[in-house]
Amino acid sequence: MKKLLMAAATAALMLGAASASASAEALKVCWVYVGPIGDFGWSYQHHQGLLAVQKEFGDKVETAYAENVAEADSEKTFERFAREGCKMIYGTSFGFMEPMLKVAKKFPDVKFEHATGYKTADNLGTYNAKFHEGRYVIGQIAAKVSKTGTAGYIVSFPIPEVVAGINAFMLGAQSVNPDFKVKIVWANTWFDPAKEADAAKVLLSQGADILVQHTDSTAPLQVAQEQGKFGFGQASDQSKFAPKAQLTAIVDNWAPHYVRSVQAVLDGSWKPAQVWDGMAEGTVSMAPYTNLPEDVVAMATKTAADIASGKLNPFGGKITKQDGSVVENVDDGMILGMNWYVKGVDDKLPQ
Amino acid sequence: MELLLTLLTIIMTAATPLLLAALGEMVTERSGVLNLGVEGMMVMGAVAGFGAAFMTGNPWLGVLASIVAGMAMSLLFGFLTLTLLANQVATGLALTLLGLGLSALMGESFVGQPGVKLPSLAGVDPLVPFSLAMVAATGWFLFRTKMGLIIRAVGNSHASAHALGYNVIAVRYLCVLFGGAMSGLAGGYLSLFYTPQWVENMTAGRGWIALALVVFASWLPLRILAGAYLFGTISILSFVLQAQGLGIPSQFLSSLPYLGTILALVVISGNKALTRRNTPASLGQPFVPDR
């Protein structure tokens, strides 16, 4: 009897050891999302990245995620993940910057990557996407499709990413129609469907016939559809909400970056970097072109391909600012800190 | 002219949810109950309305569901504060938190689904005339009927109303339920007509604005109407001014609806005697029938 017990105990121990070594082999990768994964926008797209990592690496990785993490609660979440054995942790909101910096210091053996931030550490890198490349393409489309020559642009907050988006959109539009106009409305919110719908209706009543948004709800597209006008999806393909109105959407595709980054951790070659990928790397892509004439689709496809191949730089060449001064060789640093409009934007930038 | 009409329609859409919720809360408060859970009842109305319309394909069932959901939330509030005598302020705040969390849970599978839109009747969105009719109806009911007089009596001095033989708790239950129904409907208006979709926290603070309107409007229906439409008008005009590219700072324009509405309502409530006369004296006080 005693022997039997001993044998059973030994077997159990061995089993335990075996399973422990199995989990030690799998790299635990964890994500912290600011919104719900069902937002069909920002967090949804990051979660697609998690799924891609699962698919790519199978048993070699183990994944976990936390959604709807408020910026104030994020430190706890990062710390919990680090204690639970996550070796690679991604944080996907600008507001996670300081909490991640703190937790990264506490857990030097864990690797961290922060989306859209700018602070780094020995075990903390950043990654972001060149959304403005997509905005250049939709600018061209808008200028082709608009009959009134005026777009309505609903924006959230005057941060560089948004301002660079407006500029890229206008540069794209002006490359087709130098007199193209844009009416800008600041909603001062990322997400308030009713307010965004109001802004959209007002813009359409003021002579705009195509809507662009840098806010997160699908409400403006729905308004466009109702009034027989057009618009562009934000962050993901939103054609389900407005099949007759969406021309295309700028899709954030984080999967390639996540796959590369996890691969680097597995290889042992991961280093904290400041990654800023765009169309070339596949991080920014365009949703299928719909409700568009063939020549416009051809133009947009070519522009996107040229941007991806590096032949076309949306901010390349000489650019005239709103105040009439000319800048040249706009580099990444200038785009990441952009606080001026290009010529032709009829708005005063809120400071 | 056509532009003015378009703008007027946009303003009406923006003002209607505020008007509906504020009218309901006005009746609740007139009976002496302060329900701070308007936002929670609204958001539950929004998710229930969207869900019912989405699953049955009938937006009118959605309207019904939003009313029922708002009433269910207010019934919970009534049970806690009127029967169990819990603190009204704390319970109301808890009701908002509960509504926001519960609606997010219930609505998880509705996120990303296109909604069913309430059809317009003869070019007019049906809830706009309804909300205007409710202004007249609540005003007539509160100030021209015996039942209205009883409600106001209960709200002003529950002990006296009780001594006169009125069932204070029953009257308050009914008024709380009416408030819940109107808040739920206001939420349903958002998810069925304004922006036919469901997303978490889609009421975005409108319940709080409705609450503030009731107080600033001195619990008077016509002033609530004025306040709601003023708020809607200024928010839409601030977008128009921005679209005109006049270069007025947008942060200032965004705060204008709040500033403007408060200012206007403070000015019209300059008549102190009128304000005092209309403030429910027993507001927020629990009532225990002692004999």
Image: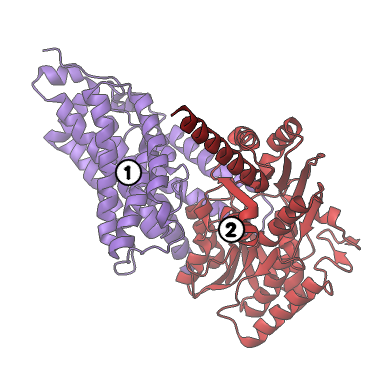
Chain colours: A red, B purple
Q: Looking at the picture, do discs 2 and 1 lie on one chain? A: no
Q: Single out the residue that lies furthest toward the top.
A: B290
* Mark 1 residue type: Ser
Q: Indicate left or right for A265 with B139 as reference.
A: right
The quarter in which the N terminus of chain A is drawn is top left
Residue at image location 26% in from the left, 41% down from the top: B72
Viewer-nearest residue: B66 or B146: B66
The kind of secondary structure element at disc 2 is: helix
Viewer-nearest residue: A116 or B27: A116
* Mark 2 residue type: Leu
Q: Dots 2 and 1: beta carbons under 8 Å?
A: no
Q: Which residue is mark 2?
A: A51
Quarter of the image for residue B94 reads top left
Q: Which residue is mark 1?
A: B183
Q: Single out the residue that lies furthest toward the bottom.
A: A294
Residue at image location 45% in from the left, 59% down from the top: B10
Q: Residues within 10 Å of mark 1 (few under 14, many from 20)?
A: many
In percent of width and height, residue A128 lies at: 73, 54
Residue A77 to residue B248: above or below? above
Residue at image location 73% in from the left, 36% down from the top: A104
Quarter of the image for residue A49 reads bottom right
Q: Single out the residue that lies furthest toward the left.
A: B165
- Disc on res. A139: none
The kind of secondary structure element at disc 1 is: helix
Question: Label 1 is found on which chain of the structure?
Answer: B
In percent of width and height, residue B234 lies at: 51, 49
The quarter in which the C terminus of chain A is drawn is top right
Viewer-nearest residue: B77 or A308: A308
In percent of width and height, residue A174 lies at: 76, 73
Distance of mark 2 from mark 1, alpha carbons? 40 Å
